[in-house]
């Protein structure tokens, strides 16, 4: 049976752990709200860019951009995995890595080349020995920035246009709320064909636009910008999901620590009471022996 000293050591360790998990929860909450605000500020730009691209798709003189050309059958595929650099965030990394690993296993015989770009230290460690690693960009997920995302996006577009890969896929955690993420895999390149904007009920059909500069020149600007923005929004969504997952995990750890502290405090008090009772019995027994 543990002694009173053992219980005191355990309680001291639990108190230190409680302080650590509570502090990490507060830090993650601050980072979560900051990243969420950045994502909210990004939403109007995303809506306007999508609306502009859809209106732009109505123009017959635009033609098809090289980044939108599909190559059938696709033989060379690149998968970009976006997860986190650090752990202690529940199943945030595990669920995504399991999705990526299952997809790689199912399609390894379908494609001639199947390579991976890792955007986190956890993904790099997970993929070691499982897939061909083309590049590692672990610095991107630490603090997502448009400039860094654009640099990687430009590299991906160059590989696609050079014919090194026929398709580029994205694997990431779609943010739902602080407690829920959905692992996803989407095709980044070739860029999806944008549907024409459908008029709402009672509205006139969208008008044809005259472009200045020419539509083809605008197309060459908008399509790459949409690809860069998509990658940046995924990195930002990953950051929001990571901090939300870590905040939830640390909240659960804090509650579990408090529960263990209560249990060990009760056990320590019982051990102390048992020690006092044993000493009283020894005193009474000794006194009775002296009387006899």
Image: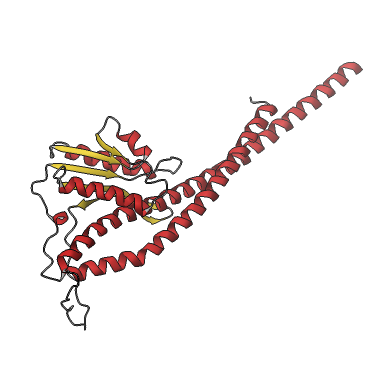
> Does residue 28 appear to the left or right of 139 in the view shown?
right
Q: Position of residue 12 (x, y in %)?
A: 65, 35
The residue depicted at 32 percent of the width and 51 percent of the height is: 149
Q: How is the image coloured?
A: secondary structure
Residue 26 showing in the rendered view: yes
The residue depicted at 53 percent of the width and 48 percent of the height is: 25
Residue 94 in the image: above or below residue 215:
above
Residue 67 in the image: above or below residue 198:
above
Query: Of residues 109 and 91, which is closer to you in this image?
Result: 109
The quadrant in which the N terminus is found is top right
Q: Quadrant of residue 271?
A: top right
Q: Position of residue 91 (x, y in %)?
A: 39, 43
Q: Position of residue 275 (x, y in %)?
A: 74, 27
Residue 212 in the image: above or below residue 254:
below
Taking the view exactly as shown, the residue that stands out farthest to the front is: 213
Q: Position of residue 15 (x, y in %)?
A: 63, 39
């Amino acid at each position: 049976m543990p002694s009173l000293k053992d219980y005191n050591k355990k309680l001291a360790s639990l108190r230190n752990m409680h302080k650590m998990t509570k502090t990490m929860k507060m830090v993650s909450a601050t980072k979560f709200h900051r990243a969420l605000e950045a994502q909210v500020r990004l939403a109007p730009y995303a809506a306007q860019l999508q609306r502009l691209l859809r209106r732009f798709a109505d123009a017959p003189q635009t033609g098809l951009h090289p980044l939108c050309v599909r190559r059938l059958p696709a033989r060379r595929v690149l998968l970009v995995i976006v997860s986190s650099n650090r752990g202690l965030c529940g199943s945030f990394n595990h669920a995504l890595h399991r999705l990526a690993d299952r997809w790689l296993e199912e399609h390894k015989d379908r494609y001639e080349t199947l390579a991976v770009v890792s955007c986190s230290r956890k993904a790099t460690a997970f993929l070691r020995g499982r897939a061909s690693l083309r590049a590692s960009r672990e610095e991107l997920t630490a603090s997502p920035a448009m400039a860094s995302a654009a640099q990687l996006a430009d590299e991906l577009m160059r590989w696609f246009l050079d014919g090194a890969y026929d398709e580029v896929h994205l694997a990431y955690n779609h943010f739902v709320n602080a407690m829920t993420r959905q692992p996803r895999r989407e095709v980044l390149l070739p860029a999806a064909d944008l549907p024409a904007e459908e008029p709402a009920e009672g509205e006139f059909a969208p008008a044809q636009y005259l472009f200045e500069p020419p539509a083809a020149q605008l197309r060459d600007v908008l399509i790459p910008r949409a690809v860069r923005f998509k990658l940046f929004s995924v990195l930002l969504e990953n950051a929001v999901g990571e901090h939300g997952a870590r905040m939830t995990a640390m909240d659960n750890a804090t509650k579990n620590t408090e529960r263990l502290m209560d249990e060990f405090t009760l056990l320590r008090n019982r051990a102390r009471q048992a020690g006092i009772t044993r000493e009283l019995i020894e005193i009474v027994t000794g006194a009775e022996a002296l009387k006899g």
